[in-house]
Image (spheres, rainbow, N blue to C red):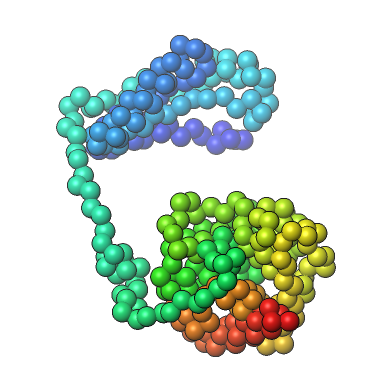
């Protein structure tokens, strides 16, 4: 206990509650007990599927590396020591006496979804779509950089703008082990068709705000895709020749505006100015909803405009 703390007996704790239907503790230290564990898990899943209520199976399993034992000794430790503290068995089984509870399925209407997202005030407001060339339509975007660079907000801005223009969108954030200063990236879809999976493994667009992100994800970009990167912080160029690249000194441009933290909005604007995937005016509407500190909306709007002009001029060059 002085090293690992006192054991938490989950089945005993839950058995003190009224509602659990099925509680059992099993082990996987030999073939016989593995078979019993399999049956217990199946029973618990069936209870859940049948709507009978909460079921839990607590499993005693080995951790040879954590225990600093070889696998055989770890299995013996479960049988000889762990089961003394965590006795095996069924703590509760009301499976036969509980009648299944069938929940009535409810399919939310479009109006209910809009209201739940807090977008009812925008329902009747028309946001015209941009008219990008074919290769920039339906982008699958991965935006990546350090935590604290506003990567997730950048991706959210693209997704929210796409939603306002009537596209099918998805946005999934991904953090590293640290928040600020650690890695951060997000996956964004803006599509005319339903989005099958929100994950973006092979992006058509990579937005890289630091060198590690460019080096890590460049290889994943689809041939013919686009890489947008902050040349203020990235001192190398993408090595591939089968993709488009756009270097923008976003951090330097943000410094010129007086706020380094709006570099993400400069990159967002540059991407849209270069591709015309979404309309600038719709982005301005989006900023009102994703920037929590209202006094910062104006500086973020300036950053988007500055980036948009940069991207548009680069495309015309």
Q: Quadrant of the N terminus?
A: top right
Asked if residue 282 shows in the view, the reply is: yes
Q: Residue at x 44, y 59 (%)?
A: 193
Q: Residue at x 63, y 16 (%)?
A: 73
Q: Quadrant of residue 151?
A: bottom right
Q: Quadrant of residue 53?
A: top left
Q: Nearer the viewer, residue 184 or 162?
A: 162
The percent coordinates of residue 297 (x first, y second) are: 52, 84
User: Looking at the image, how many numbered discs can be counted on the residues?
Assistant: 0
Q: Residue at x 56, y 60 (%)?
A: 140
The percent coordinates of residue 48 (x first, y second) are: 30, 35
Q: Residue furthest front?
A: 134
Q: Residue furthest top?
A: 32
Residue 196 vs 188, above or below: the answer is: above
Asked if residue 146 shows in the view, the reply is: no
Q: Nearer the viewer, residue 190 or 235?
A: 190
């Amino acid at each position: 206990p002085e090293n690992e703390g006192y054991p938490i007996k989950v089945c005993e704790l839950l058995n003190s509650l009224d509602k659990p239907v099925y509680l059992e503790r099993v082990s996987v230290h030999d073939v016989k007990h593995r078979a019993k564990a399999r049956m217990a898990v199946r029973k618990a899943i069936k209870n859940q599927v049948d709507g009978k209520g909460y079921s839990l199976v607590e499993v005693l399993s080995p951790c040879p590396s954590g225990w600093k034992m070889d696998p055989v000794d770890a299995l013996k430790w479960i049988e000889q020591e762990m089961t003394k503290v965590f006795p095996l068995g069924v703590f509760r089984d009301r499976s036969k006496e509980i009648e299944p509870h069938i929940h009535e399925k409810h399919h939310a209407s479009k109006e209910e979804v809009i209201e739940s997202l807090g977008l009812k005030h925008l329902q009747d407001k028309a946001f015209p779509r941009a008219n990008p060339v074919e290769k920039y339509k339906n982008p699958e975007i991965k935006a990546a950089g350090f935590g604290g660079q506003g990567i997730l907000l950048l991706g959210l801005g693209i997704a929210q703008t796409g939603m306002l223009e009537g596209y099918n969108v998805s946005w999934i954030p991904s953090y590293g082990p640290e928040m600020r200063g650690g890695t951060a990236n997000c996956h964004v879809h803006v599509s005319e068709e339903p989005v099958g999976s929100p994950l973006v493994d092979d992006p058509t667009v990579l937005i890289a705000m630091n060198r590690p992100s460019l080096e890590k994800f460049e290889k994943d970009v689809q041939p013919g895709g686009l890489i947008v990167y902050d040349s203020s912080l990235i001192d190398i160029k993408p090595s591939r020749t089968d993709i488009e690249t756009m270097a923008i000194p976003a951090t330097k441009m943000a410094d010129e505006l007086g706020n380094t933290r709006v570099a993400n909005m400069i990159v967002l604007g540059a991407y849209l100015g270069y591709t015309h995937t979404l309309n600038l005016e719709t982005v301005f509407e989006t900023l009102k909803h994703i920037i929590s500190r209202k006094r910062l909306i104006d500086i973020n709007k300036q950053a988007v405009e500055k980036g948009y002009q940069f991207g548009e001029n680069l495309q015309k060059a």
